[in-house]
């Protein structure tokens, strides 16, 4: 990560490595073996505790792309943008091409990662499991509603996927009520950035449509927290880093924003019903992960209403194009 958090503190590396050779194994840094890298210790103080953060930096002075080195296996790309473009080529082929023939190894790797290989660190998973019980997973379950209605999205170029955008939270809620006249779950977990919405609300100098819609959305979301949905029969709670702020582990509290995003994402993957938007890469990845896990209750909200993205006859993941 950009914050250089040790991978093994966020993800279940032991579990991941059981899927080798379909996906590459992850190994800890060893300065005697990885001579092209160097480790620098940084002391972090959190509350009354102190822990050491290891920053790993490249220390290679030669040309790793030179013909004489021939790295095995070859890197995915020379730089981040090239890697991103190659990934886009792959996911496009999954949707409109024949990936079993064109990218057989990459497809198997992609499916393996989304289906089961990528799993949070056991400590983080225990937090997720506890929250799921609180949300009613042992009863009727819970729904995750990804409301991508923050003002930054509303102000983006309206020509991009304008036929798929819904920025008014009331319109989204009405679609959910139309699809589910009776409460299908115990709890609705709403995923959004309260910070962005409240920052916009404080900017009284803004008077454009995006600001007015933002004010409406904030009011409605606050009312949901108080009154719930389906006439108060279903509780509405917010996702976010506050869930991590209450943990006893100082390390995870220090990185609460980052860890909170992992918790939110896996709560979405493991929910009974997921409702999101195809203009979001977050919603798309959640739905694709659920597809490979045979969780079929996945919907995109569109101006025309809720679209069931993963009925039984669908086998291909959604291609994110927005």
Image (cartoon, rainbow, N blue to C red):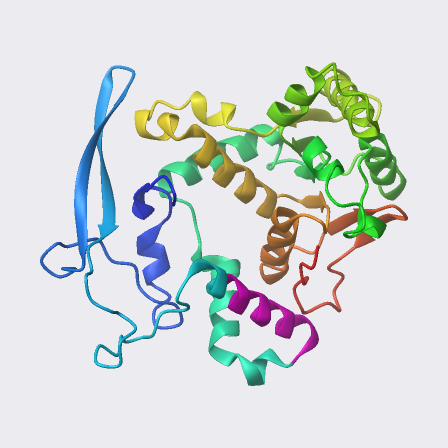
Does residue 50 appear to the left or right of 26 in the view shown?
left
| In the image, residue 36 lies in the stretch drawn in magenta | no
Q: Nearer the viewer, residue 322 or 231?
A: 322
Does residue 246 appear to the left or right of 249 in the view shown?
right
Q: Residue furthest bottom?
A: 101
Residue 128 showing in the rendered view: yes
Location of residue 12 in the rendering, given as x and y in whole percent from the top left corner = 36, 49
Q: Please give the name of the residue rendered at 71% of the width and 49% of the height, measured from the top-left corner.
A: 279
Snapshot quadrant of residue 224? top right
Residue 233 showing in the rendered view: no
Q: Nearer the viewer, residue 322 or 193?
A: 322
Location of residue 201 in the rendering, given as x and y in whole percent from the top left corner = 71, 18
Q: Please give the name of the residue rendered at 74% of the width and 16% of the height, measured from the top-left corner.
A: 205
Snapshot quadrant of residue 232? top right
Magenta part of the protein: which range?
A: 84-97
Q: Nearer the viewer, residue 66 or 265?
A: 66
Does residue 311 appear to the left or right of 18 in the view shown?
right
Q: Please give the name of the residue rendered at 34% of the width and 74% of the height, measured from the top-left corner.
A: 74
| In the image, residue 91 lies in the stretch drawn in magenta | yes
Q: Looking at the rendering, in which quadrant would you find the C terminus?
A: bottom right
| Main secondary structure of the magenta stretch | helix
Q: Nearer the viewer, residue 142 or 280?
A: 280
Q: Looking at the rendering, in which quadrant would you find the N terminus?
A: top left
């Amino acid at each position: 990560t950009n914050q250089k958090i040790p991978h093994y503190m966020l993800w279940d590396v032991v579990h991941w490595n059981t899927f080798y050779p379909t996906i590459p194994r992850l190994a800890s840094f060893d300065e005697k073996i990885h001579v092209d890298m160097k480790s620098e210790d940084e002391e972090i103080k959190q509350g009354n505790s102190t822990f050491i953060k290891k920053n790993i930096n490249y220390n290679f002075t030669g040309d790793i792309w030179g013909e004489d080195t021939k790295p095995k296996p070859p890197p995915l790309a020379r730089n981040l943008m090239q890697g991103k473009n190659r990934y886009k080529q792959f996911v496009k082929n999954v949707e409109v091409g024949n990936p079993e023939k064109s990218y057989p190894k990459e497809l198997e790797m992609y499916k393996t990662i989304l289906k089961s290989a990528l799993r949070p660190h056991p400590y983080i998973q225990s937090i997720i499991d506890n929250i799921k019980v609180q949300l009613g997973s042992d009863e009727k379950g819970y729904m995750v509603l990804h409301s991508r209605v923050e003002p930054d999205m509303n102000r983006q170029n309206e020509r991009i996927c304008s036929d798929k955008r819904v920025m008014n939270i009331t319109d989204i809620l009405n679609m959910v009520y139309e699809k589910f006249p009776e409460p299908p779950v115990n709890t609705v977990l709403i995923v959004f950035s309260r910070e962005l919405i409240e920052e916009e609300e404080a900017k009284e100098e803004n008077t454009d449509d995006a600001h007015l819609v933002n004010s409406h959305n904030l009011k409605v979301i606050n009312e949901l927290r108080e009154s719930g949905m389906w006439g108060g029969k279903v509780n509405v709670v917010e996702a976010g880093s506050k869930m991590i702020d209450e943990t006893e582990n100082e390390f995870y509290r220090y990185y609460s924003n980052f860890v909170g995003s992992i918790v939110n994402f896996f709560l979405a993957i493991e929910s009974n019903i997921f409702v999101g938007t195809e203009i979001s890469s977050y919603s798309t990845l959640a739905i694709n992960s659920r597809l490979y896990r045979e969780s079929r209750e996945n919907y995109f909200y569109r101006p025309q209403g809720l679209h069931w993205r993963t009925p039984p006859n669908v086998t291909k993941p959604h291609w994110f194009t927005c």
